Image (cartoon, coloured by chain):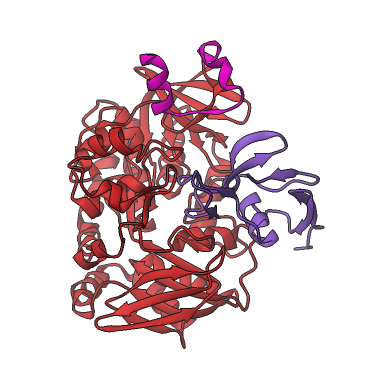
Chain colours: A purple, B red
Amino acid sequence: MPELPPLYLLVNDVPVTVAPGTTVASAILIAGIPTRQSVTGEPRGPLCGMGICFECRVNIDGVQHQRSCQVLCTEGMKVRTT
Amino acid sequence: MTERFDILVVGAGPAGIAAAVTAAAAGKQVALVDDNPAAGGQIWRSDSKRPTTARTWLEKLAASSVVRLQGWRIVDSPSRGVLRADGKDGCRDLEYNQLVMATDARERFLPFPGWTLPNVMGAGGLDAMVRGGLPIADKRVVVAGTGPLLLAVAAHLARRGAKIVAICEQAPLRRFIPFLASLCGESAKAMQGIDYVRSTFGSKIYLGCWPVAASGNQKLETVTLRRGERQWEERCDFLACGFHLVPNLELPALMNCRIDKGFVAVDHLLQTSICGVFCAGEPIGIGGVEIALLEGEIAGLAAAGNTDAAIRLAQRRTRRLGFVRALATVTELDPRLKELATNATLVCRCEDVSFGRLRHHDSWREAKLHTRCGMGACQGRICGTAAEFLFDWDSGSIFSSVRPPLFPVRVSSLGHADTLADKGDSLASADMLASKETE
């Protein structure tokens, strides 16, 4: 199978390159940053990977509270963590 | 927007796919609704090397007349015979004559100091990240918790080049003897197990062992493990830690289906206590792919009215329930795991409620009212399961508090969005809506 060209997206304005089929949660882990701050200010990252725990929720293209583990990266996507 | 189907199947994992394909083959109009980007569930995640069984069923699904509603999450049952789904572009109502719920299971997480640090994930959680594109080659990974998922995840990550530092299974050796015996009737699982062990060859496997702490600056750096009296530290990039699986019972609870000892009660044709509502896969007993597929077929045939064929398959299912029971026994939690959390350890990760604040309460309801535990975005899916084990609270009371929407939805998706307009594009959860109604 020929390899598809990589995708470029912005995570907090920082460019990240990923393979097609990559979830937004995995792209944020590749960028090495937390997905959110907890209500007491702790950094958090993904926990369950299946849309249950809500730890990976981020703003994707202006839409808040998207569970990034259930969204695939698209070219030019803008992701913002909180 | 309302659409009508003979049979609606919720959940596109093995059980749901089998139910949908089987019912469609019987000539019914079938829709399969699922909240992930692609069909396959958690076990058949998009990956270049899907097993043959997965490819076969996904091809059958592609070739079938099943209407696939991928990326839609069931949030409510507004009236009898209708489920409401929430997606990227709002809500849609799905009408059905018969319903098959194949809502799968989730990992059980237990709190210990440091479990909220980034890069401490579920075993299935880390596996999902890797299948979702996270490079794992040369990363140091500790896999811990309980259940066969640990070995499956360790094997997959090892094949991807991860350095599996340790595999820690909480169950002691003596528990494995009846479990291994139960594998005699499950040759596919036995072969898979051998394959896993081969893939993780060279990794240290500790039985009767678990993590007692995770530490690091802003993210995980070190895991402290304990086995009996011995305690030691391992440096690692990821901790993949899950304590087996618990079924997703929110939809069955909302439908008022009878739940018995933590699982949906069904008859031999997998019909729940509600006529025309069927349940298949992990919500009726944790047993893995092969049994889930069989149950999907039984539920699909029964929902389509092909009772004779369903009865024949149901006999095959009965013969395999020994494995389900053996798996439940081997994954029973060691009571010492209740002592991992300190007073400062958070139990509710959404509202940051600590063990110390919860321990004096007598019930889930009381804890919720006094501490906001379980009232955040996950609506108690993570902390409720942990609290049930930590405090021996009745799971019935946890599921009696299930209310729509089953998942927080964007306010713009709600019918009565006008009354909540001041919340803008925020999330509305059942608890938030309840407090709004009482104002």
Residue shown at the point (45%, 63%) measured from the top left:
B123
Q: Nearer the viewer, residue B291 or B172?
A: B172
Vertical side of B350 occupied by B227: above or below? below
Q: Is residue B298 magenta?
A: no
Q: Nearer the viewer, residue B348 or A74?
A: B348
**For residue B329, which quarter of the picture?**
bottom left
Residue B305 in sight in this render:
no
Vertical side of B138 occupied by B372: above or below? above
Farthest residue, direction bottom: B202
Q: Is residue B218 left or right of residue B18?
A: right
Q: Which residues are magenta?
A: B416-439
Residue B192 in sight in this render:
yes
**For residue B437, which quarter of the picture?**
top left
- Looking at the rendered structure, the number of numbered marks drawn on it comes to 0
Q: Quadrant of the C terminus of chain B?
A: top left
Residue B80 x %, y %: 34, 17
Residue shown at the point (22%, 67%) measured from the top left:
B336
Vertical side of A37 occupied by B116: above or below? below
> Mostly what secondary structure, the magenta segment?
helix
Q: Is residue B435 magenta?
A: yes
Q: Is residue A22 left or right of residue B46?
A: right
Residue shown at the point (49%, 55%) measured from the top left:
A47
Q: Quadrant of the N terminus of chain B?
A: top right
**For residue B307, which quarter of the picture?**
top left
